[in-house]
Every structure is written in structure tokens, then in C-alpha cells.
Image (cartoon, coloured by chain):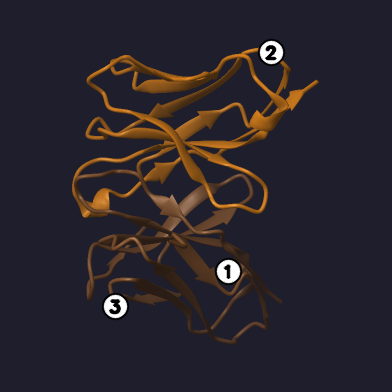
Amino acid sequence: NAGVTQTPKFRVLKTGQSMTLLCAQDMNHEYMYWYRQDPGMGLRLIHYSVGEGTTAKGEVPDGYNVSRLKKQNFLLGLESAAPSQTSVYFCASRIGIAYNEQFFGPGTRLTVL
Amino acid sequence: QQQVKQSPQSLIVQKGGISIINCAYENTAFDYFPWYQQFPGKGPALLIAIRPDVSEKKEGRFTISFNKSAKQFSLHIMDSQPGDSATYFCASSGKGGGNKLTFGTGTQLKVEL
């Protein structure tokens, strides 16, 4: 049982490049979330999903897209990376409506030059 | 955007002392108040959580005190240990909308020998 895993762990992009961050969970959780963490700003929600095939915007969705084609995977895409997207990205999952605890992955450190 | 305000930003406590971190929220519809602990290079992990129907919850050395009328809650770490040195985030969430967590900005705790 690996929990929540994120790929890659580190990435450096040039402005304008695109990339996809992969989050996978093997706990059969319904809900999944993408956050970004910046110094002094805590964690801010980018997008979330309450089930396979569903996605919704969070607090800071601009510049990002997501997909949840399979229950166990939640993909975060950057179509045209900007330096403002330099951050640490965390994925989290949660069983569903009955249980509140979110389980976080180890994070992806992204630098956009 | 509904905020959760957290203080202090950083805290230094002597081993064996009490660490206290405070949070204030705005949205009276919030009904779940967790504290997450994060070590460097790791994702946050749930430490302890409370619902507004109780004023205090204790788990080992960790206690949440909750004041519904003041819309404040705090984390107390008794007998603080060097291994408690980490960043602590308070959060809040309500029903609906994926039960999104709104995080505070974090408190960096250092416990000195």
C-alpha cells in the first residue's frame, strides 16, 4: 500500500513549456485534490475532484488544467508554464464524504525559469 | 476567499515547554478544524482534528482548544520535544464543494534542547 504517490519529484521548466504532474493513490479514495505551497502562503487549492470523471476549480485554478479519467489518478497540467508557477505541488486524497482526513503525497518541486 | 489566520509565523520553545499556535476563521459554516504537521521535504500529515460540538480534544501531548463564539482554535503541544520541530498548519472546511480545506499560512516550530 503506497498511499499517495507523485511523479516527478523535481522538475525544471522554461517559460512557455508544458508538463503534466501525476498523482496516484491506491486507497480507493473518491476525492482528490491538487495544492500548491508557497513560502508564507500555506497550501492553496488549485483543483479538486469528487469522483472519477469529475473536476472542479479551487482557489487558484488559473494556468492549470486537471483530469480524472481513472479513479486512482489525478493529473495536473500546465499548458504554458510561467515563473509564477514555481512552487511545490502537493496532491491529496480522501476516502469520501464520510471521512475528512486528507492524505498527502510527498510533493513535486517545480521551478520555471 | 474565506481566510484562516494563523499565528505566530515562527516559534522557538525549549524542550519540555508548551508550544501554542493560534488560528482564527471567518466562515461560520466551517465544521471541521484539523491541524496538519509537515516535516521538511515531506507532505503534510494530519495531527489532530476537532468538530465544533466540543471545546477541547486531546491526543497524547497534543490538544486542540476550540472557541466557537470567538471563531478561534488553537493547538497546544505539551512537553515539547526536538522531534516536534516542524511546520504546523491549521485548516478549516465545511460541507459541500468537495469539503475543501482552507489552510492557515503555517507556523514553523523549533524545539531547542
**Residue B56: horizontal and vertical position, in percent?**
35, 15
Color of chain B here? orange
Question: In the rendered image, which quarter is residue A19 located in?
Answer: bottom right
Question: Do labels 2 and 3 touch, CB within 8 Å?
Answer: no
Q: What number of labels is visible? A: 3
Question: Where A68 falls versus B71 (above or below)?
Answer: below
Of badges 2 and 1, nearer the viewer stands 2
Q: Label 2, on which residue?
A: B16
Q: A61 or B40: nearer the eye?
A: B40
Asked if marks 2 and 1 touch (Cβ < 8 Å), the reply is no
SS type, badge 1: helix
Which residue is disc 3 drawn over?
A70
Q: Which chain is brown?
A: A
B47 sits to left or right of A54? right
Please tell me which residue is depicted at 44% across the width and 59% down the height of the picture: A3
| Viewer-side residue, A12 vs A102 | A102
What residue type is disc 1 on? Answer: Gln
**Residues flagged by tags 1 and 3 on a common chain:** yes
Chain of the residue under the numbered disc 3 shown in the image: A
Residue at image coords 68%, 23%: B81
Question: What residue did someone put label 1 on?
Answer: A85
Q: Position of residue B90 (x, y in %)?
A: 46, 34
The chain ID associated with circle 2 is B
| Mark 2 on the same chain as mark 3 | no
Is residue A62 at least partly visible in the picture? no
What's the amino acid at mark 3? Lys
Residue at disc 2, secondary structure? loop
Q: Which quadrant of the structure image shows residue B98?
A: bottom left
SS assignment at label 3 = loop
**Image mark for residue B23:** none
